[in-house]
Image (cartoon, helix red, strand yellow):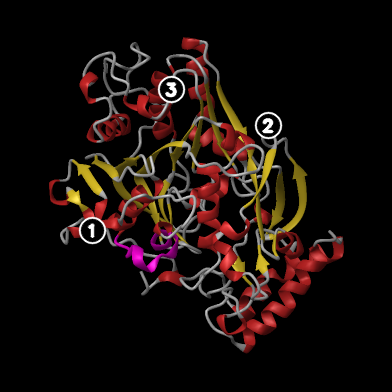
Amino acid sequence: MLRDSHVAIFQQEKKGYPQTPPFHPPKRYPECPFQGHFDTENTVYDSIRNSLLYLKMDLKNYGSKYWNPLKSVINKGDMVLIKPNMIAHSQRHSDAWEHVITHGSVLRATTDFVFLALGGEGRIIIADAPQTDSKIDLIKKRMCIESIQDLYWSDKKFEIEFLDLRNECWINEKGIYLDTIKLPGDPLGNVRINLGKNSFLADHDGKGMRYYGAFYDIDETNHHHENGKHEYLISKTAIECDAFISLPKLKTHKKVGVTFNLKGLVGINGNKNWLPHFAIGAPEEGGDQFSAKKISQTLENSIVLTAKKLLLNKNALMQKLAVKFKSLGYYLFGDTEDVIRSGNWHGNDTCWRMVLDLNRILFYGKIDGTMKNRSKKYFSIVDGIIGMEGNGPTAGHPRSVGMIIAGRNPVAVDMVCTKIIGFDYQKIPMLSKSFDAKSYILADFKPNDIVVSTNIPAIKGKIFKNTSFLNLKFKPHIGWSGHV
């Protein structure tokens, strides 16, 4: 998997998704496990099928009932984790959602090919850890997950499992977290893995940085990243699964530039507050929270960080005041979508390191908390039918693309996706540095080795030697505008 730099792109004529769950294939394919059900509007199924063909997977059996394209990734009886992007139930400012999360039609087609490879045995687990304030029941409804589960159970007596990997969700009012609700999380529990000196964050050791995680408790984040310790709390199901199938969206991202496969691994965490998202302060102060040191931002930090400490105690009066004066804070210091804060810019030197740590843990982590030499089996199918540009990953705008991008290596696939949307990977540390690991490598090839097979004639071949390669010119997040 780590040496495979082959990526497929299939572009369909119809830009949108089918609307009828459980998203049956458009015609009778000989290998399909469900021969009596069709949806002629489902071009997504056909696009995924073609992307597997373009990767030359089980080519000798293509066109017959024996075609099993994922057999090189999945063995009969394996435990397979399928991880879609389930970040939020809707766009931040509206009820729109098709450009926010992986569509159910992508999930259904992928599940069919996973089931074929399993030979009707083993386990299929759909799992993710959405944002802590997201409504998981609404996400499941919009992705039509229960419809897919019902199909498999009624027709095959095969259980498709679903897991919300979060240990808790947060009650939020106008961006202020008021309370937490405990959740079951991964039934296998979580494993604590300390990368220590092998962490990409180890370069920051001894520089006195204070990290901010995902919640108000700054001390918790820094307790897990101090004095040479860099540890993460990871879903045991993600570590124990035999094969990991990633189904991300084609989206921009405020902290790391883009979010496809690599950034999506935030969704295998048991506690996202263990994840350093940025270092407090401006570059002049050793941080990357802001792009430059200003009096207004120093004042903002003194007020906001103090308030967050008080909010940790769940003081009812403080919570009411915070909710009431949140809009005043935006008035005084600027809205987050107009002002660079919280590490939402190209100078964030923290978040990409955390992301690459998570990917190496997925590929090499062991259930006892140590790291192994052999990598996990992996496959990616990117939902690029409708992507997101601008203030991603949740506040951006939809962009109709009509593409499925697939491959065996997350770095190769993410590089191709970045090229498609028109960004320079060399300006995105999460990608450019992914080739630099001295241990637990993620890509045993160079950017110029990446080869694309596609139905778009102008862009076949080695993509970083092709000056005419497709460029959709996605609008980046404001903190990355003019940089990528």
Residue 65, position as x, y percentages in the image: 28, 13
Helix, strand or loop at label 3? It is loop
Distance, label 1 to label 2, CA atoms, is: 42 Å
The amino acid type found where label 2 is placed reads Leu
Residue 430 colored in magenta in the image: yes
Between discs 3 and 2, the one toward the N terminus: 3
Between discs 1 and 2, the one toward the N terminus: 2
Residue 318, position as x, y percentages in the image: 83, 66
Whether 350 is drawn above or below 193: the answer is below
Mark 1 closeness class: few <14, some 14–19, many ≥20 residues within 10 Å: some
Q: Residue furthest left?
A: 457
Give left or right: position of 108 versus 372. left
The amino acid type found where label 1 is placed reads Phe
Q: Which mark is residue 75?
A: 3
Residue 75, position as x, y percentages in the image: 43, 22
Is any part of residue 400 visible from this angle? yes
Q: Which mark is residue 464?
A: 1
Whether 320 is drawn above or below 383: the answer is below
Residue at 33% in and 40% down: 406
Query: Quick one: 357 or 3, which is closer to the camera?
Result: 3
Mark 2 closeness class: few <14, some 14–19, many ≥20 residues within 10 Å: few
Q: Quadrant of the C terminus?
A: bottom left
Give left or right: position of 273 versus 396. right
Residue 306 colored in magenta in the image: no
Helix, strand or loop at label 1? It is helix
Helix, strand or loop at label 2? It is loop
The amino acid type found where label 3 is placed reads Asn
Mark 1 vs mark 3: in front? 3
Residue at 49% in and 50% down: 440
Query: Quick one: 63 or 137, which is closer to the camera?
Result: 63
The magenta segment is 422-433
